[in-house]
Amino acid sequence: KAGVTQTPRYLIKTRGQQVTLSCSPISGHRSVSWYQQTPGQGLQFLFEYFSETQRNKGNFPGRFSGRQFSNSRSEMNVSTLELGDSALYLCASSEGLARGGDTQYFGPGTRLTVL
Amino acid sequence: GNSVTQMEGPVTLSEEAFLTINCTYTATGYPSLFWYVQYPGEGLQLLLKATKADDKGSNKGFEATYRKETTSFHLEKGSVQVSDSAVYFCALNRGPNNAGNMLTFGGGTRLMVKP
């Protein structure tokens, strides 16, 4: 099976702009989660989508939003970009059915730079 | 809330040396535990996992045992290679109310193996 894919791989934006990142999960996986990785804060959970519904949410401001489509593909949007949003954004997919947490498989990430 | 603590790096070893990276966790209930590895410029790769107490995860010579009594999941390898140089992340997965996915990561440990 093909792995998790993320597009684009690199993005450069300026403060105040908005950005949309895309993630295609492993075929058959219904859960997609997003994580932010920065040198200062490490890896932090943003949100999880399952069957087109947000199932879990981390502690990020409302500028960070997402959605999932019927084919399980997911997009993440960040509005009114700030310098501190510069990070590697990782998408992970899993079957989504296990109690207590699935095994999540990660994509290569999108490197966002905000100038 | 959930948390994961792992030893800070960098850890520098000579080729064929024994590796231990300590990881302890705090969580409600019984989360699944994981080790992920990240190579420069890449996303996270699943290295191994354990889903219940006393389970041993293993892969590519790496091992870790889920110890409920000490809330630990230490990573070990008997003989490291230069190609093992990377950053290693310990993580637990437990969604709120035991529903869905929410990975909590340790801060990462950079391993450098010298020939």
Image (cartoon, coloured by chain):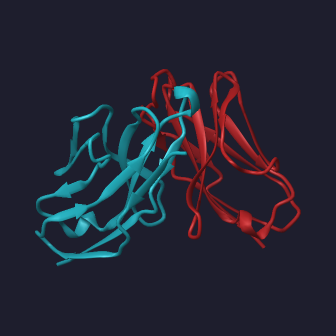
Chain colours: A red, B cyan
Q: Is residue A4 left or right of residue B20?
A: right
Tell which of B28 and B31 is nearer to you: B28
Q: Quadrant of residue B5?
A: bottom left
Where does the image place residue B20, in percent across and percent down from the top left? 21, 62
- The residue lying at 35 percent from left, 53 percent from top is B24
Q: Is residue B107 left or right of residue A67?
A: left
Tell which of B50 and B114 is nearer to you: B50
Where does the image place residue B66, in percent across and percent down from the top left? 26, 41
Q: Is residue B38 above or below residue B33?
A: below
Tell which of B43 and B3 is nearer to you: B3
Where does the image place residue A50, in percent across and percent down from the top left? 62, 26
- The residue lying at 78 percent from left, 73 percent from top is A115
Q: Is residue A5 left or right of residue B31?
A: right
Q: Is residue A24 left or right of residue B69?
A: right
Where does the image place residue A72, in percent across and percent down from the top left? 62, 27
Q: Is residue A95 above or below residue B110?
A: above
- The residue lying at 21 percent from left, 35 percent from top is B54
Location of the N terminus of chain A (image quadrant): top left
